[in-house]
Image (tube, rainbow, N blue to C red):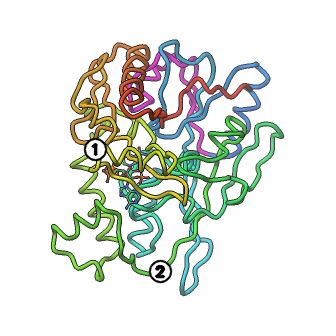
Amino acid sequence: MNVQTNIPLSTLTTMKIGGNANYVADVTSKDELQQLYQNSKKLNQPVYVIGGGSNLIAHDEGFPGLIIHNKIGSITITDDNPTATTIVAGAGEIWDDLVKYTVDLELSGIEAMSGIPGTVGAAPVQNIGAYGQELADTFVSCEAYDTTTDTFVTLTWEDCKFSYRHSIFRGEATGRYIITSVTMSFNKTKPEPPFYDALDKYLTAKHIDPTTVTVQIIRDAVLDIRMNKLPDPRVLPNAGSFFKNAIVEKWKADDLLNTYSDMPTYPVDDQHTKIPAGWLIETCNLKGEVIHGMKVHDGNAVVLVNDAATGYADLAAAREQIIDTVRDKFQIVLEQEPLELTLIVQA
Ligand code: NAP
């Protein structure tokens, strides 16, 4: 097991901000994970587990403990019948490699989540979603190291309490579990229209008959759409959607529609409506603006790119300015989507 010292968190997170972590170790097995965690506990050293670092914001003061880089791999088919296939994937697998694997097998369930950066283990934490699919749709269970009991446990779909970009892992159980593998069930049916607006428009523009669509066509379409709208974190540092879409009471959305008739809205339930955060930010004329070194991305205003931020303070100032501007115009308070590395798991 290779433990490195004084590693800049800016090199471990796609936003490329953050001071040094005292120690960083890659773990490739459950045994290594348990051993490292218990060692840190004995030394009274805080531990934080990361996957791809693509949905994580680090702070300038760094991290006074051990960062565990979860690289527990393997993808295994555990059940296969005429209608469905069950797959167990290690938490350290790259999410998009898993998507490609399932699409190559013509399995449906996560094809619209193609191209999302990060690892399999990070996917349940915020119940990742894109273009009408979310992890909770295919999730069966996950195995995790329970840091409070020093045991490996299986958490069911119900245990995880998934909601919109949320789960117990970033809510009531923050820091308790370290996910080691995820079990998902995929079906063998073809994707059926209606598709998400952006996908539908893409297929129409490419003259693709929606009734002939395969999982491979959806994957290719999503990768193409993403490439044109989203900045590649290897070129322009960013953490994907920086704000969650606003979920507001239906009356509030209806009220805003009286003034902003072009505002996109999507029903969540009888009483709540989703308004895209990107539209709110763009309508405040912030798209393309550089605020405290953070650029509101030209292709999609929900993404903030680290253009020239000198550290976390710049990011925080940009975030507050955007939140304040949107609140003053729409009386809606945006929430940050990426996690912050200060949510320390105390060993
Ligand atoms: P978009 O197509 O410009 O649409 C803006 C927002 O409207 C999306 O966030 C989406 O909500 C919502 N939306 C669009 N069509 C919808 C429909 N038919 N029903 C319900 N909601 C609808 O969005 P975008 O920003 O380019 O993102 C496209 C997809 O990729 C979205 O699903 C988005 O969540 C996902 N994505 C996620 C990240 C991330 O970092 N988490 C980054 C980029 C894109 P939802 O977000 O609820 O789907």
Q: Is residue 11 magenta?
A: yes
In which quadrant will I find the N terminus? top right
Q: Disc 1 on helix, strand or loop?
A: loop
Say above or below: 146 vs 142: above
Say above or below: 213 vs 21: below
Q: Residue at x 71, y 44 (%)?
A: 31
Q: Amino acid at mark 2?
A: Lys
Callout 1: 10 Å neighbours few (<14), some, many (20+)?
Answer: some
User: How many numbered circles does the render carry?
Assistant: 2
Start-end of magenta stretch: 1-28
Q: Kindly tell me whether mark 1's CB lies below 8 Å from ligand 1.
A: yes
Q: Position of residue 144 (x, y in %)?
A: 70, 48
For the residues marked 1 and 2, what is the alpha-carbon distance in whole angstroms? 30 Å
Q: Is residue 38 left or right of residue 91?
A: right
Say above or below: 29 vs 291: below
Q: Position of residue 24 (x, y in %)?
A: 56, 26
Q: Is residue 14 magenta?
A: yes
